Image (spheres, grey):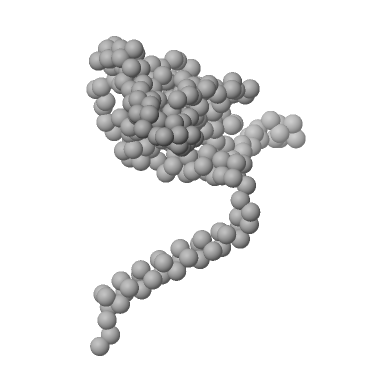
Amino acid sequence: MGGEAVAAAKPTPTSFANPDAGYTGTIGRPNPNFGTDKWYTTAEGSFEKRVAQPSVMDGFSGFNYNKIPSQPGEFYSRDAAPILQYEWDEEAYYKNWKPAKSDEQVAEELALPLKKMEEKWDEVVAGEEDGVKGVQYTPTMEYMRNELPAARPLQFALSPFFQLNGKGYRKNWANTRICEYRPAQRFFNTNSTFLSDYIYRFQVTKFNLTHRPRGRYFKFFFYFGVTTMIMDHLWAHEFRTQAKWH
């Protein structure tokens, strides 16, 4: 066999970093942009379709878990394959959902604390001899009186992991309604990768870019040292109570 025949018969090497990189067919992989090392891709393109479609829950203050890859077999899911059959479609439910109160009624109820504060302010000012000069006006009262301004428009494409509310701010526990927190879904319906991404991709990054702590790594030594001492003390106490020498 000649050298050309040997070269033609020699298989093309495939990178071990991405086993799908050398496969160009569609069997088991109808999505050509799918990659095992890509966070926001799925083999059949189900997640890409969910992100591209408008969702009624995008207008809610809570986090829309349908816009992250948390379905079975996706990046943030605990299950590699579906193990339950969901008979309730949350997206379809809220499309036909009729709220019990109108937007005007909700706005009136939200404005009630401000109205009460202004009435109390007039009452306190009227009871002071110096009038307004004898009453302290705090920054919190100023925040309550002013409407939250809209955030500046983004100049870049935002990852689906970070979701914005109607004002343009990132959805977090501070601006989410209590009825939309869903702590059980965050911890029990997603894997540990979602929690680690939430901590490192946002919390740690925000800490590094906004707080600018001095001697951060030096302080970490004290933090881990004290934490280790506490854990060692707890285990030592447990050992002394369970395994005593006589």
User: Can residue 180 be seen in this snapshot?
Assistant: no
**The quarter of the displayed image where residue 189 is located:** top left
Q: Quadrant of the N terminus?
A: top right
Place of residue 185 in the rendered image (x, y in percent of width and height, measured from the top left): 33, 35
Name the residue furthest front: 129
Q: In the picture, residue 94 is in which quadrant?
A: top left
Is 180 above or below relative to 49? below
Q: Nearer the viewer, residue 44 or 182?
A: 182
Residue 199 position within the rendered picture, expressed as x and y whole percent measured from the top left: 49, 43
Q: Residue at x 61, y 57 (%)?
A: 217
In this orientation, does residue 233 appear? Answer: yes
Task: State the residue lying farthest toward the bottom.
Answer: 246
Q: Please tell me which residue is depicted at 59% across the width and 31% down the height of the picture.
A: 22
| Residue located at (57% from left, 37% from top) | 18
Write down the quadrant of residue 67 in the picture.
top left
Picture residue at 61% right of the left edge, 51% below the top:
213
Q: Is residue 187 above or below residue 239?
A: above
